[in-house]
Amino acid sequence: MNYSTDFPSLEGKVSAEEWQARVDLAACYRLIDQYGMTDLIYNHITSRIPGTEDHLLINLYGLLYKEITASSLVKISVEGDILAKPDTDYGINKSGYVIHGAIHKARPDVQCIIHTHTRAGIAVSAMKCGLLPLSQTSIRFIGHIGYHGYEGPAINLEEREQIVNDLGPHDALMMNNHGLLTCGATVPQAFNTMYQLELSCRSQVDAMAARTELSMPGDNILEHTAHLYQPGARRPYGVLEWPAMLRLLDAEQKNSGYPPYRH
């Protein structure tokens, strides 16, 4: 089996728009690893290729997130057809296009989708109470997050419509007994939303584990605060911190032993 990860660079061999999408998506994979949101080789992040209606980028199924580079990403259609991939026996995760393809198809405003199985995310996804407004971070999502009931591993194409309906117009979805999903108009925005959702879940698990009476703001404060975090009320998420995130990756790369995400 050919499981080599020495992939030749695609820079200059694809359009400038596709290359930038590849670099941003590879960086997002590395950041999800950097902040402890990976699950071995599992899960997926996708990005729409600018200038196309149905062409997406997704990871090879078998690579660690810290191994993923711009040139190792696979180009697929929203229906999961592989259009271009490196010369390797690694394929793609079927759940990646079952979940992501449906959302990309239904939501043309979405460029990037992130799905995770984290300890805190899974824990909160199993709670009947859902995400609670226990922190300023979590209040951002009150009234702005969907919930999707568990239907088994996401490999059934018939589940796609329900996922889309449960997500609705939101950029965050709690997949019950499963994990978390966020999306955004840009890769930085989707990453910011996932980072904040994960932090909200970690804070909730910690607070509930303390076994003390919990305090939550009143409904008027919740509505006002949640509104202040919505698009149009502030700058787009991810714009300010993304360059700093890339500098972080560049600094970490020097001693990582892994190929640069920009390769």
Image (cartoon, rainbow, N blue to C red):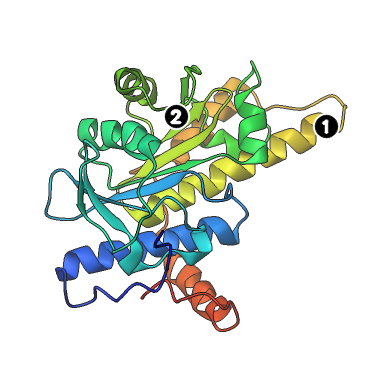
Q: Amino acid at mark 1?
A: Ala
What is the x, y in percent for residue 66? 52, 64
142 sits to left or right of 120: left
Q: Amino acid at mark 2?
A: His
224 sits to left or right of 207: left
Q: Up-down: is 118 above or below 178?
A: below
Q: Which residue is mark 2?
A: 144
Instruction: Specify the farthest residue to the front.
Output: 1
Q: Nearer the viewer, residue 172 or 153?
A: 153
The quadrant the C terminus occupies is bottom left
What residue is at 71 percent from the left and 40 percent from the top? 203
Q: Up-down: is 52 above or below 253?
A: above
Q: Which mark is residue 83?
A: none
What is the x, y in percent for residue 213? 84, 24
SS of the residue at dot 2?
A: loop
Q: Which residue is mark 1?
A: 209
Contact, mark 1 vs mark 2 (Cβ under 8 Å): no
Q: Up-down: is 257 above or below 39?
A: below
Would you identify the image quadrant in which residue 238 lies? Answer: bottom left
Q: Up-down: is 242 above or below 109?
A: below
Would you identify the image quadrant in which residue 172 lies? Answer: top left
64 sits to left or right of 53: right
The quadrant the N terminus occupies is bottom left
